[in-house]
């Protein structure tokens, strides 16, 4: 599938070109310009506020002309009425980027009030979010919106790719060359020739596909205090509330001993680092790992078997595990 469309609608800027400063230059580009385009205002009869489609003129007014982000109080303006956000104000050395006049310290209270009266769709509306919010609480929702794109779950290097799950599955396979498996049981071997070396960057990722969902199996070696440890855990490629419908178990052992971990996969919304730091998985101390590896302790050879199942509730409220066929 194609990458999701950019979350920001295409800009259709209709700003006046910079004008030489004149006593009434405020009528251009600033909030007064909106007054000459009454159609841009929230429709009468829409209640106290109006629902404004992104890309409308009011929405454009609330976009910082410098960085194009939405502006939040304090919104600033120059003496000629050109607005800009507080982040940009701190960066422009007291010169209005539009008319080059001295900026001073003028708040644009009128625009702040207009913003307060607006209701806007979530910025992920093009990804399917139907929600509409008062301007100032929109940002809070967007940070938690379940339609927001996921970050690439690949561990080990900074990867800035974001997208929906099908897109990220393809990205993991094609760009990170991650192994893909189907089925809800697995049997994985981790071999490392020099187990004395544990850098923080030692990790492996495999993706499993079952129940129509995708799961990331992580195996990592890291230093815990003075001691190197190995850790295996599963992450669910989806939101946390969905992740709770699944359980998994991991088993490692040899020589008549075994360690078993049973847990709920964490959502890939939680970074692999966060999961690792909370020890939410199968943790194997190095001595035990070497013991399980057999041989002369020169090589790490762990065989990890695992299983994923779905927890479904029966009408009487009890949980029944469902195995995939
Ligand atoms: Zn800005
Ligand atoms: Zn200006
Ligand atoms: Zn949303
Ligand atoms: Zn990536």
Image (cartoon, rainbow, N blue to C red):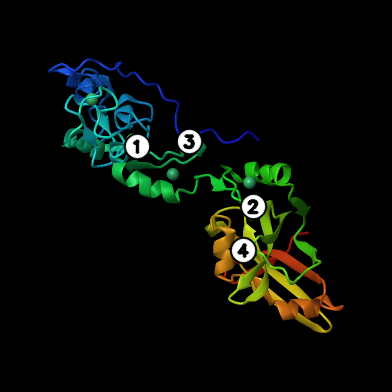
What residue did someone put label 1 on?
A: 120
Secondary structure of the residue carrying tag 3 is loop
Q: Is residue 210 above or below residue 220?
A: above
- How far is mark 1 from mark 4, CA to CA? 35 Å
Q: Quadrant of the C terminus?
A: bottom right
Q: Hey, which residue is sitting farthest right in the picture?
A: 295
Q: Is residue 322 left or right of residue 325?
A: left
Q: Pointer 1 and pointer 3: residues touching (CB < 8 Å)?
A: no
Quarter of the view holding residue 316: bottom right
What residue did someone put label 2 on?
A: 154
What residue did someone put label 4 on?
A: 265
> Visible in this render: residue 259?
no
In this rendering, the label closer to the viewer, 4 or 2: 2
Q: Between disc 3 and disc 4, whose residue precedes?
A: 3
- How far is mark 3 from mark 4, CA to CA? 29 Å
Q: Between disc 2 and disc 1, whose residue precedes?
A: 1
- How far is mark 4 from mark 2, CA to CA? 16 Å
> Visible in this render: residue 72?
yes
- How far is mark 1 from mark 3, CA to CA? 14 Å
What residue did someone put label 3 on?
A: 7
Q: Between disc 1 and disc 3, whose residue precedes?
A: 3
Q: Nearer the viewer, residue 46 or 246?
A: 246
Dot 2 beta carbon under 8 Å from ligand 4 = yes
Q: How many marks?
A: 4
- Residue 319 rendering spot, x and y as whole percentages: 61, 70
- Residue 62 rendering spot, x and y as whole percentages: 30, 32
Q: Between disc 2 and disc 3, whose residue precedes?
A: 3
Q: Residue at x 69, y 62 (%)?
A: 202
Q: Pointer 2 and pointer 3: residues touching (CB < 8 Å)?
A: no
Circle 3: is it few (<14), some (14-19), or many (20+) Cα within 10 Å?
Answer: some
């Amino acid at each position: 599938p194609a990458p999701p469309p950019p979350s920001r609608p295409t800009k259709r800027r209709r700003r006046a070109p910079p004008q030489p400063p004149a006593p009434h230059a405020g009528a251009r580009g600033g909030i007064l310009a909106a007054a000459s385009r009454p159609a841009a205002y929230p429709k009468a009869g829409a209640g106290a506020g109006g629902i404004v489609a992104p890309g409308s003129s009011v929405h454009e007014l609330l976009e910082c002309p410098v960085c194009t982000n939405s502006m939040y109080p304090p919104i600033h303006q120059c003496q000629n009425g050109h607005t800009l956000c507080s982040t940009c104000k701190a960066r422009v050395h007291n010169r209005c980027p539009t008319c080059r006049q001295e900026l001073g310290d003028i708040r644009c209270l009128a625009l702040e009030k207009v913003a307060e009266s607006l209701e806007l769709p979530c910025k992920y509306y093009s990804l399917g979010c139907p929600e509409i919010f008062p301007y100032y609480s929109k940002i809070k929702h967007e940070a938690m919106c379940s339609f927001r794109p996921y970050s690439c779950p690949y561990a080990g290097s900074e990867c800035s790719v974001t997208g929906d799950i099908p897109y990220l599955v393809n990205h993991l396979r094609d760009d990170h060359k991650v192994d893909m498996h189907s089925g809800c049981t697995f049997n994985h071997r981790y071999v490392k020739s020099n187990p004395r070396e544990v850098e923080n960057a030692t990790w492996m990722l495999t993706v499993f596909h079952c129940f129509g969902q995708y799961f990331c199996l992580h195996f990592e070696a890291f230093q815990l205090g003075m001691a190197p440890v190995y850790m295996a855990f599963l992450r669910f490629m989806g939101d946390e509330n969905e992740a709770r419908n699944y359980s998994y178990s991991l088993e490692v052992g040899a020589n008549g001993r075994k360690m078993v971990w049973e847990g709920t996969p964490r959502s890939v919304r939680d970074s692999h680092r966060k999961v690792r730091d909370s020890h939410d998985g199968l943790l194997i101390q190095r001595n035990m790992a070497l013991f399980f590896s057999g041989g002369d302790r020169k090589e790490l050879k762990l065989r990890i078997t695992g299983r994923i199942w779905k927890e479904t509730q029966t009408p009487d409220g009890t949980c029944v595990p469902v195995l995939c066929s």
